[in-house]
Amino acid sequence: MSEKILGGVLLFISLAGIWLARSFEAPFSYEPVGPRAFPMLILALLGISAIALMLEKKSAVTWAAPATLKRIGALFLIVLAYAWLFDKLGFIVATTLMVVPVARFFGASWKQGALGGVGLGVGLFILFDRLLDVALPTGLWVANILG
């Protein structure tokens, strides 16, 4: 029964989102499809998935072990902290601080997690900020140092 309720909520969200996305218009036309195509496509896929979820016949649900649920909750809190610290600490530091505990969850040592976090933070920063020209935050602490 819970998947039918979740499907209904997701269907409502997708329909409300599609209704809102109809009014998305750019002040000038820079591409043929405009800004509404992507959200409407994603929300339509969400709606189709919600209908499939509501129509699917499921057997009894078995929950994961409590230890697994605690790990999932901890991962959720780590990602939430990452989102909160992203602008404050900057991409590289926030990514490093997120990768270390996530790597530990998957069996890495502290050294592997730290090296992987620094490598991933710096590598992705160079890729996105420098090569792909996607502006990533450097953090408030760098702004204070540089003035």
Image (cartoon, rainbow, N blue to C red):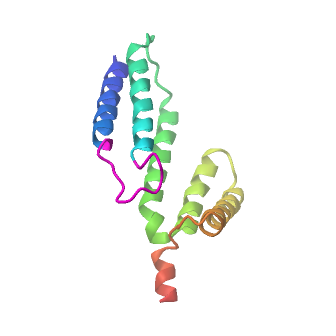
Task: Give how far across and how far down residue 16 sits, in percent.
Answer: 28, 36
Where is residue 60, by image quadrant?
A: top left
Q: Nearer the viewer, residue 3 or 16?
A: 16
Q: Nearer the viewer, residue 1 or 13?
A: 13
Task: Give how far across and how far down residue 17 sits, in percent.
Answer: 32, 39
Looking at the image, which residue is at 52% across and 34% down?
68
Looking at the image, which residue is at 47% across and 35% down?
69
Residue 10 within the magenta-colored segment of the rendering:
no
Please state, as top left, top right, bottom left or bottom right, where the N terminus lies in the image.
top left
Give the total number of marks visible in the rendering: 0
Q: Nearer the viewer, residue 52 or 101?
A: 52
Task: Give how far across and how far down residue 116 sits, in percent.
Answer: 69, 58
Looking at the image, residue 31 lies above or below residue 94: above
Where is residue 48, by image quadrant?
A: top left
Looking at the image, which residue is at 44% across and 50% down?
77
The stretch of residues the image draws in magenta is 21-35
Looking at the image, residue 52 lies above or below residue 108: above
Q: Give the prevailing secondary structure in the magenta stretch.
A: loop
Residue 26 within the magenta-colored segment of the rendering:
yes
Task: Give how far across and how far down residue 22 sits, in percent.
Answer: 31, 41
Looking at the image, residue 85 lies above or below residue 105: below
Q: Nearer the viewer, residue 141 or 70?
A: 141
Kindly give the residue lying farthest to the bottom in the view shown: 147
Looking at the image, residue 96 lies above or below residue 71: below
Looking at the image, which residue is at 63% across and 50% down?
104
Where is residue 126, by image quadrant?
A: bottom right
